Amino acid sequence: MIASPSQLARRALFAFLLTFVASRVMVFLIMARRIPNLYFFLRGTHVHHLNYGIFLLAGVGAYLLLWLPQGKALRVAALVYGVAMALTFDEFGMWLHLGGSYWQRASIDAIIVVAALLGLVAFASNLRRFESRHIKASIAILIAVVVFSVVLYDASMKIGRVEGPRLEALEEASSP
């Protein structure tokens, strides 16, 4: 069975969202000392999970380019790609600003942008089949997304002012 780009994007999106949620939960639980410290340290340096994502992206990219997989192998590669993207972009703020808190707003923004792009590829209809009703619906959805984003941004800023200092203190307390 040949997988379409939208089917592969849906697999990648699924793995991306699942990995993002799992990584955030794991980090929070480790920082809150609810589970053992599972971080990998190399000679005293904490190896962040964005590094795992970068290596996975390099590996899956080479695999796709050099072996041109089909069928099940291609579908598995889409899942691994989603995992790698989540691990990498979950810490986008840290590599954008070369350090700083794990809880940076830039990381959440990056996750939203990547998820939206994967979602667009996964669920957008073929543009050649767009009819006027599709365009009208797309404009309505775009307006709703913009309004929702403004409301979400405002809510996240309020939550950030309340929870941000607590998360940063938790992060500092969990540092070796």
Image: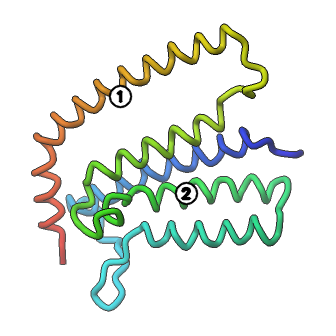
Q: Position of residue 11 (x, y in %)?
A: 65, 45
Q: Which residue is mark 1?
A: 149
Q: Quadrant of the C terminus?
A: bottom left
Q: Quadrant of the N terminus?
A: top right
Location of residue 65 by image quarter: bottom right
| In the displayed structure image, the side of residue 44 where residue 124 appears, left or right | right
Q: Residue at x 17, y 53 (%)?
A: 167
Secondary structure, mark 1, is helix
| In the displayed structure image, the side of residue 18 where residue 170 appears, left or right | left
| In the displayed structure image, the side of residue 153 where residue 144 appears, left or right | right
Residue lying furthest top: 133
Neighbour tally class for label 1: few under 14, some 14-19, many 20 plus, Cα within 10 Å = few
What is the number of the mark on residue 48?
Answer: none
Secondary structure, mark 2, is helix
Q: CA distance from mark 1 to mark 2?
A: 25 Å
Q: Position of residue 103 (x, y in %)?
A: 25, 54
Q: Do labels 1 and 2 touch, CB within 8 Å?
A: no
Neighbour tally class for label 2: few under 14, some 14-19, many 20 plus, Cα within 10 Å = many
Between 157 and 159, the one lying in front of the other is 157
Q: Residue at x 78, y 24 (%)?
A: 128
Between 25 and 56, the one lying in front of the other is 56
Q: Residue at x 20, y 58 (%)?
A: 32
| In the displayed structure image, the side of residue 124 where residue 152 appears, left or right | left
Q: Position of residue 91 (x, y in %)?
A: 37, 60
Amino acid identity at mark 2: Val
Of tags 1 and 2, which is closer to the observer?
1
Q: Residue at x 71, y 46 (%)?
A: 8
Q: Which residue is mark 2?
A: 83
Amino acid identity at mark 1: Ser
Q: Position of residue 99 (x, y in %)?
A: 26, 69
Marks 1 and 2, the one that precedes in the sequence: 2
Callout count: 2
